[in-house]
Image (cartoon, rainbow, N blue to C red):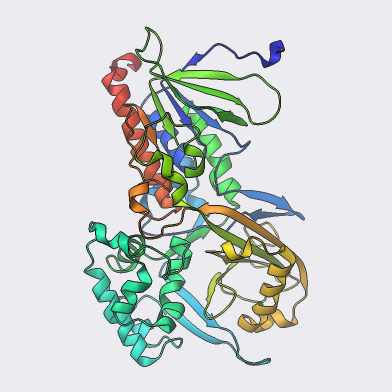
Amino acid sequence: MTAAERPAPPRRADAVVVGGGLAGVTAALDLADAGASVVLVERRRRLGGLTWSFEHAGRWIDNGQHVFLRCCEAYLGFLERIGSAGDVELQGRLEVTAVRPAGAPGGRPRVGTLRRSDLPAPLQLGPALLRYPHLGVADRIGAGRAALALRRVDLSDPALDTETFAAWLARHGQGPAAVAALWDLITVATVNLPAREASLAVAAMVLKTGLLTDPAAADIGWARVPLGQLHGARAADALGRAGVEVALGRRAGRVQLLEPPLAGRGRFLVPTRPDGAGGAGDAVEADAVVIAVPHGAAGDVLPAGAIRAQESLGQLGTSAIVNVHVVFDRRVTDRPLLAGVGSAVQWVFDRTVSSGLAPPAGTGPQYLAVSLSAADRLLRRHPDAIAGEVLAELPRLLPAAGGATVLDTLVTKERTATFRAVPGTAHLRPTAETAFGGLAVAGAWTATGWPATMEGAVRSGHAASAVALHRLTDRSFSEEVA
C-alpha cells in the first residue's frame, strides 16, 4: 500500500449524512441549521440523486421529467431553503390536456381538458369530468361516484395494502376503459405503476391528498431550469453556506458502532473510500448518522439489524422510467404539458426554454420530453426502436408534428427510478428510526406515507434529521455548541 492509499486517521463530526439526493441534502441542512457540524458523503460527483441533468448537443437534458403538486409543501419548502423557489412554474389552476390519437391517417385527435373549477373539493373537477370526451356518459358519472367513495377510505387501514387500486376500482364500477382513460393518467405518473399493479394504499393516498381534500392541491408545477441547477448546484451552494462539508466521489462503507463510545469519540464510525480505483480511504466518527441512499444500496451501509426486514429490502423491487427527448425544427404545440390517452405516449412536456434551446417567445426549434413511466418493458428495447415508436405516435397526438423535421432524438432510461409500490410492500418501508439511537434512514422508499416522489424524499430527510438531532440533544449537544 502506498502512502497515498493508506487510510487517514478518523476525523470528527457531530453528524454524517450518507447520500446527496433530496433526502440527504434535506437532512444535512436541518442538522447544520441546528448548529451541528455535518459531513455529507456522496458517491457521485454531483448532488441531486435521481434528479439530474447533462449537456447534449448544446442544450441541457434532464434525466427525466419531474413534476410536483401544490400540495407538496415539504418539497416547496426545500426549494425555498436552497434558493430555487423562483426557478419553478406552478399552475394557477390545474389544467391537463388529454389527447386521444387520431384513429386514421390524416384524422384529428380527440382533445379533452381536465380543468378545476371554483367548486370546493371534491367537486372541483366535476364540471370537467362531465364533459370529458374520453369516457362515455355512464363512466363519467361512475367516476364521480368512485371519487366520492375514495374520499371515505381510511388511509390508516392496513388492509389497503392487500389489494390493487384496479381491484378496488372494479368493485366501485370502474371498468378497464375508465381506468385507462382517467385513473391511470394519475396512477402511472405518480406511483410509477398502473392501477392493476399499484397498491390501493399508495394510490388512495395520492388521490385523496391531491384531488379530494383541497381544490388547489393538484395544481401542477415543474422546473423552469435544468434539474442539475434547480437541485444539484443550488443545494451545493446552500450546503456550503450552512457549513456542511461535502465529500463527492466517495463511497461509504458499512457503518460501525463504537460501543462503548470512548472519550472524545462519537458513537459511529463511517468509513469512506474513493468511488473508483486508487486513492486513500478515511473515516468519520460521529454521534449521529443519516443513511439516505436507495433501498438497493442501504443494506451495504447499515449495520446488521438496524431496520426491520433489512434482509428483505430487495423485495421492494424497482420500476423504471424512460424518456424520449425530441427536437423539432419548429413549434408543434403551445401546451406546456399534455397527456396521451390510448396512446404509446403517456406525457409530453415542452422543455425548450429550460434546456437553453430557445427563448420563451422563440419561433425556432422546439424540444419535447416524452415521459414513459412504469417502463420496465422498454429496458431491453434498443433506443432507436423506442424513439421510432414515439416519433410515429406524436403526429397522431400533435398534427403539427407531422409536418415538422426531427432534428435530434435521445432516449434516457432510469432503470431504478422508484421502488414498486405493489400490495404487500408497506411493511418493507421502515420508519426513520433504527435499532441504534442516532442512526436514521431516509429516502423516498421509507415509510413517508407518500409514493416515491420528491415530496416523499424531502419528508424522509426531515424525519431522519429529527432522529439524529434527538441523539445529539441527548448527549448535551446544545450545550457543546452554545
* The residue positioned farthest toward the front in the image shown: 311
361 versus 123 height, above or below: above
Q: Is residue 269 visible?
A: yes
Q: Is residue 76 visible?
A: no
> Which residue is found at the position 59% from the left and 65% from the top?
377
> Which residue is found at the position 54% from the left and 73% from the top?
338
Give the image location of residue 206, x and y in percent: 36, 62
State the residue in front, 233 or 309.
309
The quarter holding residue 145 reads bottom left
> Which residue is found at the position 46% from the left and 30% from the top?
17
Looking at the figure, which quarter contains the C terminus? top left
The quarter holding residue 143 reads bottom left
Give the image location of residue 56, x and y in percent: 74, 53
187 versus 459 height, above or below: below
Give the image location of residue 211, x and y in percent: 33, 68
Give the image location of residue 451, x and y in percent: 40, 56
